[in-house]
């Protein structure tokens, strides 16, 4: 009896499912889907509601976002949490370490593409902005900002650029497991104090 009960509660086999569908009128039988197809359809709907993002608390700025993305220029860009920023004269994300003079010569810049812009506000404050069209997602500025500053620069996957690959190469290559697939309800994780 126990075995018989187990059979009744078990999922339909494909053969039994097709047999049940075969007993339905011909027009309705065409509309029957296999249990496998139904699961795939439901999963595809859930996947469409998800996207890849970086947890700024886990990211170690390893540089793999620049090199591992399937796109020619990574979908990962540097973001600036301006509410967190100290607008420092000597910005760890803008200048390399051990700069002797505070000038904007290329050899003093941390960003290899010149994506970070520096504008004078008032003594001793400067405003820093990121030109996303120049940013390659290398994370050098974010690493410097987190090492020598307050961490207002961080990396994030830009949804408008991302191809939403089911097997994200970045997520597989990330040593900190900082890249995860999340729902739209979770949205972007912003950096805060």
Image (cartoon, helix red, strand yellow):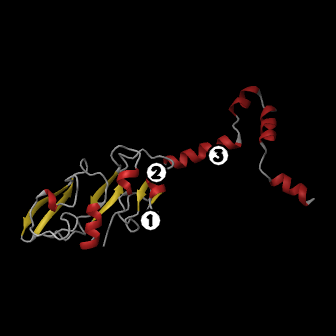
Question: In x, y percent, where is residue 48?
Answer: 49, 46
Please determine whether, in this image, residue 181 is positioned above or below residue 161: below
- Which one is nearer the viewer's eye here, 106 or 79? 106
Crowd class of label 3 (few under 14; some 14 to 19; many from 20; radius 10 Å): few
Marks 2 and 1, the one that precedes in the sequence: 2
Please name the residue that numbered disc 1 is placed on: 176
C-alpha distance separating marks 3 and 1:
31 Å
| Numbered tag placed on residue 169 in the rendering | 2
Q: Earlier in the sequence, mark 2 or mark 3?
A: 3
Q: Which mark sits nearer the N-terminus, 3 or 1?
A: 3
Q: Residues within 10 Å of mark 2 (few under 14, many from 20)?
A: some
| Residue 17 against residue 106 in the figure, above or below | above
Answer yes or no: is residue 149 visible.
no
Disc 2 from disc 1: Cα separation: 14 Å
- Would residue 148 appear left or right of 8 to someone viewing this image? left
> Which residue occupies 37% across, 66% down?
60
Q: Look at 89% across and 57% down and name the residue there.
A: 3
Point 39% across, 47% down: residue: 162
Circle 1: element type: loop
The residue where tag 3 is placed is: 39
> How far across and how far down the image is residue 12, in percent?
78, 46
Q: Is residue 140 visible?
A: yes
Q: Position of residue 135 (x, y in %)?
A: 26, 52
Whether tag 2 and tag 3 are in contact, CB under 8 A, the answer is no
């Amino acid at each position: 009896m126990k075995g018989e009960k187990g059979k009744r509660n078990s999922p339909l086999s494909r053969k039994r499912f097709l047999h049940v569908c075969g007993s339905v009128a011909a027009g309705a039988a065409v509309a029957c889907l296999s249990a496998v197809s139904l699961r795939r359809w439901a999963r595809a709907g859930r996947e469409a509601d998800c996207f890849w993002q970086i947890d700024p608390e886990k990211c170690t700025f390893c540089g793999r976002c620049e090199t591992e993305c399937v796109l020619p220029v990574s979908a990962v860009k540097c973001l600036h949490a301006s509410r967190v920023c100290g607008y420092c004269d000597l910005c760890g994300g803008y200048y390399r370490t051990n700069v002797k003079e505070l000038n904007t010569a290329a050899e003093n810049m941390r960003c290899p593409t010149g994506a970070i812009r520096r504008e004078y506000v008032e003594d001793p404050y400067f405003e820093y902005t990121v030109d996303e069209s120049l940013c390659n997602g290398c994370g050098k500025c974010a690493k410097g900002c987190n090492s020598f500053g307050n961490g207002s620069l961080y990396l994030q996957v830009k949804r408008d650029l991302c191809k939403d690959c089911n097997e994200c190469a970045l997520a597989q290559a990330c040593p900190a497991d900082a890249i995860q697939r999340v729902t739209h309800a979770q949205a972007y994780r912003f950096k805060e104090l």
